[in-house]
Image (cartoon, rainbow, N blue to C red):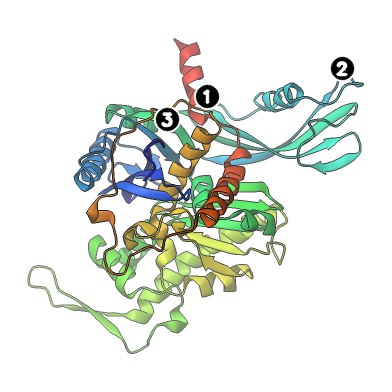
Amino acid sequence: MNQEQPIIVGLDIGTTKIAAIAGRKNEFGKLEILGFGRANSNGVKHGQVLNIDETIKAIRMALDNCYASNPNLSISEVYVGIAGHHIKSLQTRGDIVRQHTEDEITQREIDQLVADQYKTYIPAGDQIIDVIPQEYAVDNFQNIISPIGYGGVKVGANFHIITGDKNAIKNISRAVEKSGLQTKDLVLQPLASAAAVMGQEDLEAGVAIVDIGGGTTDLAVFYEGILKHTAVIPFGGENITNDIKTGLGVLKTQAEQMKVQFGSALSNEAKGNAFITIPGLRGMPAKEISVKNLANIIQARMSEIMDFVSYHLKQVGLDNKMLNGGIVLTGGGSQLKHLIQLTEYVTGLNARIGFPTEHLASGQIEELAKPTYSTCIGLILKGYSDYEHNRKQFEQVNMKVEVPAGLRRHAGSEEMEMPDEDLQKARVKNRKGIKDFWGKFKDGIIDLFKEEEDHAL
């Protein structure tokens, strides 16, 4: 265990669950999970904090469970994911005519170009969360990744601007603060999930990350190493549960259980003669429910979600066979049976499930490698990117906090010793990997809101 590295905590405030995961990188550059807690979420709907008190209770319970998994932990700062159907994105174009055309283009001019985009008109009540440059142009030269050092009269860029509702963002910050924590940064959830399940080659090949959560489905589309599009689709796993509850006349808990145990995203794959018996309420007769009918309900809603994904891909001209990396499904909803086949059928693209295992140290319990925790793992990776680039100050804990026995896989989890040369290669490779990913985005979403509140005082 590398005691020099800080312990970073990701807090995923979702519609169905709130998860807190504490991690620290080992000598191989992989995350060792030092604490893990989750709780059912009650105050969040469609990714938005509506009931602050209920959300605080759930955050505290997730934290208590995290401490229960490792009593040596001390948590004060967290990286928090942000989603919700109030998150929107738009494309803009910005140019500046340079004053000193005989000099090379500098970082200051690029910063000015980005800063100008914060003056873009957006509806009242919304706030620009992030401005992400996609590709630059210098005079007649297009598709430049970094124009610093070029010479020219005019420099411009295409930008991806992400906006969100001011009150929704304040509610998240308030719930975290009242839980006794400090928000180190707010991170867009689809970007956190993408960081957890993607490698550099996925970015280059072109890939769409589809994170199916409880209340929303988050989408992030990358092409030729550039973030092309983000979107939050206002449907998720909870909508499917509600459809089952209404369509089959069962309780919500029964609907959720049936979805997880017997659900399929393709009705053709469900057995026509298979039935589930649901006990009757208070002396009522038991109900026989067709597995085929259950699959029909799930397929209808899942097809709708995938139609939205196809629509967004068409909007940015990346449907058909443009994305060589296909679609990567992650989040709790990605674990539905036959979802890969349905996704491929609706979108016409190859699909696979994205697990956050690429960045996790081996020997952890299997629960942590589930797609459900992709966002949380991605939040820790964002923290490490900030730490490695000296973007934020971190406490150097130097406490002897080991991976607790409860989070270690016991049977057959012996690791082979890696020779020094291989160890060095592993370190270098890992440093290169996702660091490039977070380097593409503007830092400090949370700072924007702090600045705004300071002005308001």
Q: What residue is at 61 percent from the left and 67 percent from the top?
A: 347
Which of these two is toward me, 284 or 73?
73
Residue at numbered disc 3: 184
Residue 63 % position (x, y): 25, 40
Tag on residue 99? 2
Closer to the observer: label 2 or label 1? Answer: 2
The amino acid type found where label 2 is placed reads Gln
Q: Is residue 297 visible?
A: yes
Residue 164 % position (x, y): 52, 35
Q: Secondary structure at mark 2?
A: loop
Tell me how far mark 3 sits from mark 1, CA to CA.
Answer: 12 Å
Chain-order first, disc 3 or disc 2: 2
Residue 138 % position (x, y): 86, 34
Q: What residue is at 46 percent from the left and 65 percent from the top?
A: 301
Tell me how far mark 2 sits from mark 1, CA to CA.
Answer: 29 Å
Q: What residue is at 22 percent from the left and 48 percent from the top?
A: 69
Q: Is residue 84 visible?
A: no
Tag on residue 448? 1
Residue furthest toward the top? 457
Q: Are marks 3 and 2 in contact (CB under 8 Å)?
A: no
